[in-house]
Image (cartoon, rainbow, N blue to C red):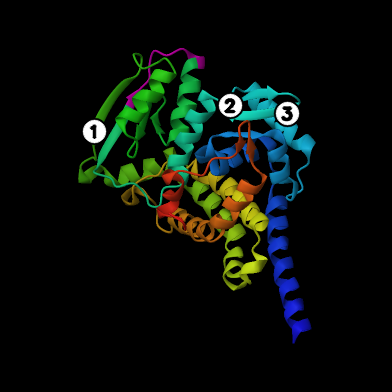
Amino acid sequence: FIKEKYNNSMNQMSKLDAFIQQAVTATPISGTSLIASLYGDALLQRGGEVWLGSVAALLEGLGFGERFVRTALFRLNKEEWLDVVRIGRRSFYRLSDKGLRLTRRAEHKIYRANAPEWDGTWLLLLSEGLEKNVLADVKKQLLWQGFGALAPSLLASPSQKLADVQSLLHEAGVAENVICFEAHSPLALSRAALRSRVEECWHLTEQNEMYESFISLFRPILPLLRDCDPAELTPERSFQIQLLLIHFYRRVVLKDPLLPEELLPAHWAGQTARQLCINIYQRVSPGALAFVSEKGESSVGELPAPGPLYYQRLGGLPGA
């Protein structure tokens, strides 16, 4: 009986490890993108600073070596996404003002539990008159925020708040060159044409396929987590599953315009993907938190405990 129990335990452990390995090798993983996911998920709410050696220790079990980590951190510093402080022979990397701003914007989108409520209001931005390079950069940021291009110089969003968009335009230095309108949903006669335009402007078919790929990759881990012995779900495995989950989910959801349900096509996979992410994240978050506490070190010692915002993620986490 003891031998059979041991063999079952080893089989279950190997299934968890096999899933982690499959996720790591599913698509090529960019070092800068993975470490951006690490900072946003594990470090943003814990001071935003960590020793280079801690990052290497956290990622070692996933098969990413110190060279991979050093190269990615160097590039993120070069892009002014991270600042570096050197104390003796140690380097500590902290989210810069730019990195903090972008990570907080992403956090709001990644960890929301439900689609935003919609009152029928649209935010329209007319961007004529901007230099070509400036327009391309601003347009890229706005599309990332969930805007769609109804026309070459006319961007629209049913889910963005005016204050947030004005803040972004001020940061880009173009607030006085972009005209903002608020409009209400069109007459009934226009609804069919609008739905067709929405499909085209926001590339919803492509977005839905990305969600379906995410679901296919992560759905198999749920029964493994549900059935495994608690001792098998170690802090390290919990951390690895959580980081990969958020890394892959982040790549999809940050491209999602978060359109109201009324504008979405039938069989939209976004909410299914979000619920899958919630179910997995809630199961692994306590162990992942413990592993980051064990391996993480800042320039003043242990990482601070996460604040209330961390525990509000995805509708509420264990330990809130």
Name the residue type under label 1: Ala
Crowdedness of circle 1 by 10 Å Cα count: few (<14), some, many (20+)?
Answer: few
Q: Which residue is mark 2?
A: 81
**Which residue: 44% across, 52% down?**
314
Asked if the residues shown at circle 2 and circle 1 are in contact, with their CB atoms under 8 angstroms apart, the answer is: no
**Which residue: 65% across, 52% down?**
240
Nearest the viewer among 91 and 8 is 91
Per the image, is 131 magenta?
Answer: yes
CA separation in Å, label 1 and label 3:
54 Å
CA separation in Å, label 2 and label 1:
35 Å
**Which residue: 36% across, 28% down?**
165
Q: Which residue is mark 1?
A: 183
Quarter of the rendering containing residue 92 = top right
The numbered mark at residue 291 is: none
Tell me the quadrant of the picture where the N terminus can be found.
bottom right
Is 220 left, or right, of 15 in this rendering?
Answer: left
Q: Earlier in the sequence, mark 2 or mark 1?
A: 2
